[in-house]
Structures are given as C-alpha cells and as structure tokens.
Image: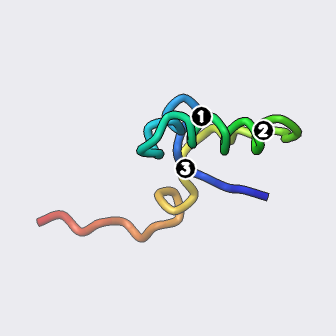
Amino acid sequence: MIASQVPVGSLHQSFEDATVADAVLDRIVHSSRRIEMKGESMRKLLAPPKEEE
C-alpha cells in the first residue's frame, strides 16, 4: 500500500529525472487500484477551534 497527498498529475514533478519517474510510476500504476478520497481533512474538522486574536 502506498499513500500520498501528492495529486497523481503532479507525481512526475516529484522526481528529478523524467526517465526514472516514468519507470517508477509505471511499475506502481501497472497493477494498482487507486482510491481518491474527497472531502475536508479530518484534522481540520476535529481540530480545536482557534482563538481569535
């Protein structure tokens, strides 16, 4: 299992070398199932309210 907050469209930018990016992503994506979560972050929803200054 691989979890990331990087959008799929931005993964190539995470690598310095485009050839390496293609090789790594091809091996990961070839036999994977992608689940994209939608909605507000649970950290934001459960965080204590900020005090106004």
Dot 2, how many residues are within 10 Å of its Cα: few (below 14), some (14-19), or many (20+)? few
Q: Quadrant of residue 49?
A: bottom left
Numbered mark located on residue 38 in the image: none
**Residue 45 point in image, percent of width and height:** 51, 57
* Residue at numbered disc 1: 8
The answer to whether the residues at label 2 and label 1 have Cβ atoms under 8 Å apart is yes
Numbered mark located on residue 34 in the image: 2
In the picture, the quarter occupied by the C terminus is bottom left
- Check disc 2 and give the amino acid type: Arg
* Residue at numbered disc 3: 5
Q: Secondary structure at mark 2?
A: loop
Q: Secondary structure at mark 3?
A: loop
State how far apart marks 2 and 3 are (Cα).
Answer: 13 Å
Q: Is residue 46 left or right of residue 25?
A: left
Mark 2 or mark 1, earlier in chain: 1
Q: Secondary structure at mark 1?
A: helix
- Check disc 1 and give the amino acid type: Val
- Check disc 3 and give the amino acid type: Gln
